[in-house]
Amino acid sequence: MEEYLNKSKISGDIFRFLYLNKQSSRQEIAQSLGISLPTTTRNLNALQESGFIENAGEFQSTGGRKAIRYQCVANSRYAIGIDITRNHLSIVLIDLALNIIDNTRLRIPFHESHDYFCILKQEFEKIVSKNIPDRSKLLGVGIALPVIIGEDHKTVTYATVIPLSLNIYNFFSDYIHEPFLFFNDANSAGLAESWKGDYKDAVAYLSLSSSIGGAYMNNKMIYGGSNNRGGEFGHMTIIPHGKRCYCGRYGCLDAYCTANVLTDFTEGNLKEFFDILKSGTNRGIQNIFEDYTDYLAIAVNNLRMCFDCDVILGGNVGAYMADYIEDFREKASKLNPFERDGSYIRVCHYRTEAAAVGAAIYYIDQFIQNF
Ligand SMILES: [Zn+2]
């Protein structure tokens, strides 16, 4: 049905306006976009008939006719995000409103092998066939990897966390037949958080998992820098001649704030670390966490000094920080010469799905921009 929509600049502007404002009335749309009411009505009708927008009830009114509320149809399009880490594979299906429709997460070590990609394809197909009968509604597949990606989003320019060959894009194309592109995992996670938190201006995201990464975003767009390495916060030196980092240098943030610093004491189990910490029964665990947050506070304060924006704690460790955020804000504030209030430090929305959701958002964003 939607194939009949004759897309125009005006219908695109109306669709984008509704997407950004969640819901709106005919009058408000006409006024905000400077279009006449009859033109607005004609376009709203066409968009509604084609299944891209819907009637969401009426606005409260004190008298006269109540205005109809319009909104975008969330399930008119979908995107998939795949997050590949050294030991896990996550697949997430989201709709236009970024709702997670379905997801799966397997513990499976990455290998650039036929066996691995067969499992990936199988899990991917399971989610698609279960949720999207009409495959033309699937916009594309964003793949998040713990590597640095070239500007074309098809080449890998730096990979140490997982081993990848240079023709990895071609390897993927034998198994995934939808449009797909590669994204840096921490950049993607940051993007997902900035969309979810609806950040209109700048925000820095710090990904605290088995390796440290991040992203700096402005108006929900990632700042890539000159070499697409913007947001590589893990290799900021925080202790001169300090602990050795996996990159080969000394004193990087990664060496002090990788999740492994915590999980080394609980046989790799982060949940167990935080369970023990919460129980308050183990002095050793408490000291480890104190040291960890001392270093983390340096990094977070540095980000605040650089960017003067909110800083989101994300990644696997960030997902557990809600219970400790007030103490941590106080700790970071002590390093800050300008402010005592640490409320600029936020805890992430997503627990494990952020990187996959962020990679999928690329396709949602493209769809909205080009509508
Ligand atoms: Zn390093």
Image (cartoon, grey):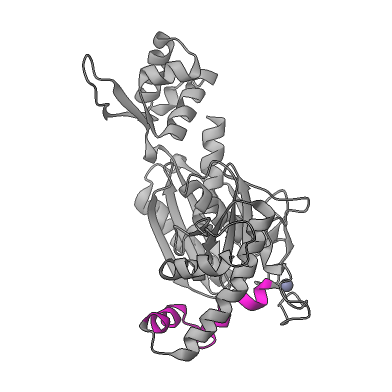
- Residue 179, x across and y down, in percent: 57, 46
Spot the residue most to the left: 63
Q: Nearer the viewer, residue 276 or 95?
A: 276
- Residue 221, x across and y down, in percent: 61, 44
Q: Quadrant of ligand 1?
A: bottom right
Q: Nearer the viewer, residue 101 or 122?
A: 101
Q: Is residue 260 visible?
A: no
The answer to whether 99 is drawn above or below residue 84 in the figure is above
User: Going 48% across and 84% down the picture, which residue do you hit?
Assistant: 286
> Magenta stretch containing residue 2, yes or no?
no
Q: Is residue 361 visible?
A: yes
User: Going 50% across and 46% down the picture, which residue do you hit?
Assistant: 195
User: Going 53% across and 55% down the picture, which residue do you hit?
Assistant: 344
Most frequent secondary structure within the magenta stretch: helix
Q: Which residues are magenta?
A: 253-278
The answer to whether 41 is drawn above or below residue 211 in the figure is above
Residue 182 relative to residue 1: left or right = right
> Magenta stretch containing residue 276, yes or no?
yes
The answer to whether 334 is drawn above or below residue 229 in the figure is below
